[in-house]
């Protein structure tokens, strides 16, 4: 694969990430990853992570989450190694908090039942592969 091919591949991957990010932000997509297969000059692009060979994409890893609750807030923590803050997406849908992260060709997903919180986190971060999202509780107790 030449330098031009690598640049083209990187551009394609950035476009795919942007489309997924936009769809998640606009509520047009359910979080998750089904895979992608890219052909460059008639040959599959090399996969990464836990894939089984060239042209494969590592499966999405479902991560466990810790939930800590105070009188005013709910904090959710999960591990997504290699994921940076701009590579993670949070969304509450039907009482489930979805946290999706992508690092290179590896996808991560956490699903956490969450009720009675505002839809947007008051704080979110991803440091050293640990995702933190803190949500303010709704005083009336109305589920989101």
Image: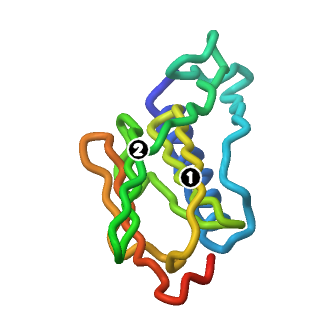
Where residue 93 sits: x, y (%)?
67, 66
Q: How dense is the environment of label 2, judged by Cα within 10 Å: few (below 14), some, or many (20 and up)?
A: many
**Secondary structure found at label 2:** strand
Q: Nearer the viewer, residue 53 or 62?
A: 62
Q: How dense is the environment of label 1, judged by Cα within 10 Å: few (below 14), some, or many (20 and up)?
A: some
Mark drawn on residue 78:
2
* Looking at the image, residue 5 lies above or below residue 133: above
Q: Nearer the viewer, residue 9 or 64?
A: 64
The earlier-in-sequence mark between 2 and 1 is: 2
In percent of the image, x 53 and y 89: which residue is there?
140
**Secondary structure found at label 1:** strand
Where residue 133 sits: x, y (%)?
39, 61
Q: Is residue 87 left or right of residue 96?
A: left
Q: Residue furthest bottom?
A: 140
Which quadrant would residue 26 be assigned to in this image?
bottom right
Q: CA distance from mark 2 to mark 1?
A: 10 Å
In percent of the image, x 61 and y 33: which residue is there?
60
Q: Nearer the viewer, residue 18 or 61?
A: 61
Q: Which residue, given by chain and number where applicable, does mark 1 sit on?
A: 112
In percent of the image, x 55 and y 37: which residue is there?
107
In percent of the image, x 47 and y 87: which residue is there?
139
Q: Is residue 52 left or right of residue 69?
A: right
* Looking at the image, residue 41 lies above or below residue 119: above
Can you say which quadrant of the picture contains the C terminus?
bottom right
Where residue 10 sits: x, y (%)?
50, 42
Between marks 2 and 1 in the image, the one whose residue lies nearer the viewer: 1
Q: Residue furthest top?
A: 53
Q: Say if mark 2 contacts mark 1, CB within 8 Å.
A: yes
């Amino acid at each position: 694969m030449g330098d031009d091919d690598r640049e083209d591949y990187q551009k394609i991957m950035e476009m795919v990430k942007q489309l997924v990010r936009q769809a998640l932000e606009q509520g047009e997509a359910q979080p998750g990853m089904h895979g992608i297969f890219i052909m460059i000059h008639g040959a599959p692009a090399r996969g990464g992570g836990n894939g089984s060979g060239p042209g494969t994409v590592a499966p999405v890893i479902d991560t466990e989450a810790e939930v800590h609750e105070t009188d005013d807030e709910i904090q959710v923590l999960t591990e997504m190694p290699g994921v940076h803050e701009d590579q993670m997406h949070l969304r509450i849908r039907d009482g489930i908090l979805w946290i999706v992260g992508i690092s290179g060709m590896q996808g991560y997903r956490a699903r956490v039942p969450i009720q009675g919180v505002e839809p947007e986190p008051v704080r979110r971060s991803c440091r050293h592969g640990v995702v933190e999202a803190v949500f303010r509780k709704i005083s009336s107790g109305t589920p989101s």
